[in-house]
Amino acid sequence: MTALIVALIAGAVVGLALGGLGGGGSVLAVPALIYLLGFTPAAATTAALLIVIATSVTGLVAHAREGHVRWRTGGLFAAAGLVPAAVAGALSAHIPSGVLTAGFAALAVVAGVRMIRPRAGASAPDEDGARPASTARVARTGAGLGTVTGFLGVGGGFLVVPALVTVVAVPMTSAVGTSLLVIIVNSAAALATRLTTPTVLDWATIAPFTAAAVLGAWDGKRLAAKVSTAALQRIFGVVLLAVAAFMLVDAVV
């Protein structure tokens, strides 16, 4: 199987995850780039940010058209993560590849478990009856997720969606779309610092990967309307746990 075909297939899966769940795309993109397409961990995490930004913009447009984006809340959440994401992105260049791989694998485990077994009480609040969180609480949560984005090159949507629902009291109908706004801002901040470091990127692979992911995001949006979110989360959760196990073994051995 040629690298082009692998890139197209992997990109489509990443797009489905982002379009359908509002997250999980970069957690799948990074291992695909490393183990299927031969990228180094540093190059893979940088490329994943590029891919996720382009794909998330596509998904954000689709959700915005339906009025499912909380711009003010998402903007505050994202703004709080800007500086942490940029600083962590710069520091990540000085972290050994094995440590990055192990850290990413651990994060994938957390993401997989959260998708398979959502935390009790994490159901979406009512559209009209939710009490919004304080500005300080939103800022703290946003800063923490920005740091994760910077260090590990992930958009963090699989963490942003439950945080928006349980911490910020955004209804689930708006959480996925709002998470894409946060992903775009945090990923752009992390990418800005990463691009100042001497990382070689294979654009011949990144371009088709991104194109397939963008198209997959539209399909993911339609799929989410037909299949329950819980079922999609379980499928992607199992995939993430398998990927995490492989990466942990690779980092340790």
Image (cartoon, grey):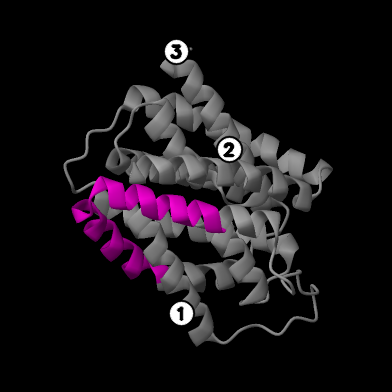
At which x and y percent is residue 110? Answer: 54, 59
Lateral position of residue 212 relative to residue 98, left or right? right
At which x and y percent is residue 105? Answer: 44, 50
Q: Earlier in the sequence, mark 3 or mark 1?
A: 3
Asked whether residue 144 appears in the rendered view, the answer is: yes
Q: Secondary structure at mark 3?
A: loop
Tell me the magenta residue range: 81-110
Q: Amino acid at mark 2?
A: Gly
Instruction: Classify 10 Å Cα crowding around label 2: few (below 14), some (14-19), many (20 and above).
Output: many
Asked whether residue 154 appears in the rendered view, the answer is: no
Which residue does the numbered mark 1 point to in the structure image? Answer: 140
Q: Main secondary structure of the magenta part?
A: helix
Q: Nearer the viewer, mark 3 or mark 1?
A: 3
Residue ranking furthest to the left: 198
Q: Earlier in the sequence, mark 2 or mark 3?
A: 3
Q: Which mark is residue 15?
A: 2
Q: Residue 227 occupies which quadrant of the picture?
A: top right
Which residue does the numbered mark 3 point to in the structure image? Answer: 2
Q: Amino acid at mark 3?
A: Thr
> At x 55% / y 38%, what residue is drawn?
14
Marks 2 and 1 sit apart, C-alpha to C-alpha, by 29 Å
> At x 55% / y 62%, what residue is drawn?
159
